Image (cartoon, grey):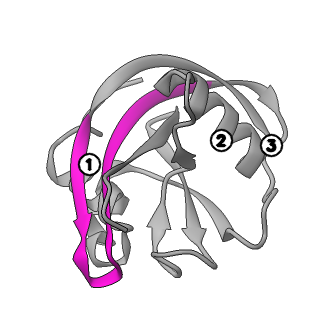
Amino acid sequence: MTQVRVGVGAVVVDDGRILVLRRAGAHGAGTWGLPGGHQEFGESPERTAVREVAEETGLVVEATARLGFTDDPMPEIGRHYVTLFIACTSTGGELRLMESDKATELAWLTPDDLLARRDELFVPLRHCLDAGLLDVKR
């Protein structure tokens, strides 16, 4: 790939914990990442976050803030992303794995839990954590 893609990571926070999923099937398989995906043409980052959370987890969320972004080159697999992180609050739905070909497990982890598992995190989530974008109290 010779272009930079825009990814969106939804930071769904509940009681100080962040929703993560163990990735499968795509780049980053086996690592923990946020619900999210590619921003589509004409779609806001907030709308992307809401859509992706529903598609991947069954939760209905409201986007509440833009937390920042990371620059995520992955030369070993020929990809490069700029990832936008959107804070979200759950407003309904039932948490469940919706796309078993894309994720194998869901978990609620604190920022400290994520830091302890830093080597197990998908590159954009690791960069997000390192940049302090998850130091939010919601």
Q: CA distance from mark 2 to mark 1?
A: 18 Å
Q: Residues within 10 Å of mark 1 (few under 14, many from 20)?
A: many
Q: Main secondary structure of the magenta part?
A: strand
Could you say whether the residue bearing mark 1 is in a helix, strand or loop? Answer: helix
Q: CA distance from mark 1 to mark 3?
A: 24 Å
**Residue pushed farthest front?**
2
Q: Position of residue 133 (x, y in %)?
A: 24, 37
Q: Which residue is mark 2?
A: 52
How many numbered callouts? 3
- x, y percent for residue 5: 38, 50
Which is more N-terminal, label 3 or label 2? 2
- Between disc 2 and disc 1, the foreground one is 2
| Residue type at numbered disc 1 | Cys
Q: Is residue 87 magenta?
A: yes
Relative image position of residue 103 (x, y in whole percent):
67, 69
Observer-nearest of 79 and 94: 79
Q: Quadrant of residue 58?
A: top right
- In the image, residue 39 above or below residue 31: above
Q: Residue furthest left?
A: 131
Q: Are marks 1 and 3 in contact (CB under 8 Å)?
A: no
**Residue 122 point in image, percent of width and height:** 38, 67
Circle 2 SS class = helix
Q: Amino acid at mark 3?
A: Gly
Above or below, 67 relative to 23: above
> Magenta residues?
69-89
Where does label 3 land, which residue?
58
Determine whether, in the image, residue 87 is placed left or right of residue 12: left
- The residue lying at 46 percent from left, 43 percent from top is 9
